Amino acid sequence: MKSVIITGANGFLGSTLIKKLVERNVKVVAIDVTFQPCNLPDVSLITKVETYITDADDLAAKIPADDYDAFYHFAWAGVNGAVKANPVAQIKNIEMAAICMTVCNKIGCKKILCAGTIAEQSVKSLPFLEKTSGGMMYGIAKHCTHLMLENYSKNIGQPFVWMQLSNIYGPGNLTGNLVSYTLSELFEGNNPCFGPADQPYDFVSVDDTIEAIIRLGENETPQNTYYIGSGKPRLLKDYLICIGEIMGYPERIGIGKRPDDGIKYTVEMFDATDTKSDIGEYITKSFEEGIKETISWMRNRQ
Ligand SMILES: NC(=O)c1ccc[n+]([C@@H]2O[C@H](COP(=O)([O-])OP(=O)(O)OC[C@H]3O[C@@H](n4cnc5c(N)ncnc54)[C@H](O)[C@@H]3O)[C@@H](O)[C@H]2O)c1
């Protein structure tokens, strides 16, 4: 790839991807609502476009003319926090993804790659739940976006990849997701609390995730959906205890202290075989190695 567009460019994944791409001499148009503070390196390969994505013509007009290889769409309001549960905010995210596909097609960019999540799979549990948590709305919005974009891409003939991401951890991750929450609580002297955590789960380091994301942009991608997983899912409680052991506080990991949220994941949902067969092995470090690296990044921040 020589030239790409990235939305959500100042966020956790967008900024990490951009740092790796400029190391490989790729030109990037970086789009986000704000770059203050800026998480991107100050290099001439990056053109920053500060805008709210609300309209296709407006966005297309702000993107400099070029021969773009890939359009990575990461922008999403409410990846974490209360907005995750807000249906109106989540519908706007679906609309934003459709706008990005329209723009990608209009400017002749070769491929659009959008960020999905394993949380999409939670919709399969919805009919069996009496009560849901905020994360369900996020999963539903991603699921709807996935279906609408797959249909839209086939309708307008736009090459499209839905990157279903697992749980991501590593340096730079302050998103409050499972690893970020667990480590933050342990660092602050609190006891992190969880449900029974006895179902299959999967984590991939941010570095390995970004490598897969770059390869999905570069390689031929005969499928529409790729799950970016480790290929070796474990029980969630094994991962959590592992974090506690590495931190030296296994007894502070409060498994079973919260009620079961009722969302069921199966081993098949974490199958990364097709992804690895199309882009090769991208996992370079074990969960234990990645957690040690993350802990040392968190220690250095303190
Ligand atoms: N971080 C994870 O563990 C994880 C896991 C699975 C999927 N994802 C998905 O990956 C993507 C990136 O996640 P992240 O962790 O980097 O999130 P993030 O919140 O750090 O970044 C999202 C960025 O999108 C921008 N944005 C929101 N609305 C916008 C708009 N209307 N116009 C322009 N920019 C807008 C925000 O300003 C923010 O910088 C999201 O789509 C998320 O759902 C993330």
Image: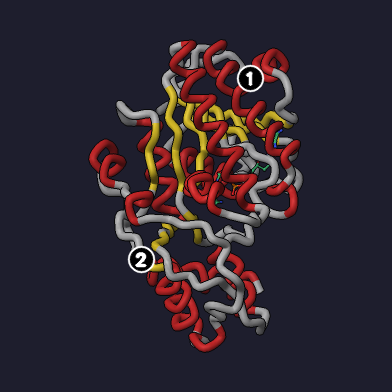
Name the foreground residue: 15 vs 202: 202
Q: CA distance from mark 1 to mark 2?
A: 43 Å
Name the foreground residue: 247 vs 163: 163
Q: Is residue 94 left or right of residue 152?
A: right
Q: Position of residue 188 (x, y in %)?
A: 67, 79
Q: Amino acid at mark 2?
A: Arg
Q: Residue at x 68, y 48 (%)?
A: 84
Q: Nearer the viewer, mark 1 or mark 2?
A: 2
Q: Residue at x 41, y 38 (%)?
A: 214
**Residue at disc 2, secondary structure:** strand
Upstream in sequence: badge 1 or badge 2: 1
| Residue 124 visible from this viewpoint | yes
- Disc 2: which residue: 234
Which residue occupies the extreme left position in the image? 277
Question: Residue 275 occupies which quadrant of the picture?
Answer: top left
Question: Residue 31 occupies which quadrant of the picture?
Answer: top right
Q: Is residue 162 left or right of residue 5?
A: left
In which of the image's four quarters is ligand 1 placed? top right
Badge number at residue 63? 1
Q: Position of residue 35 (x, y in %)?
A: 72, 41
Position of the C terminus, as image quadrant, is bottom right
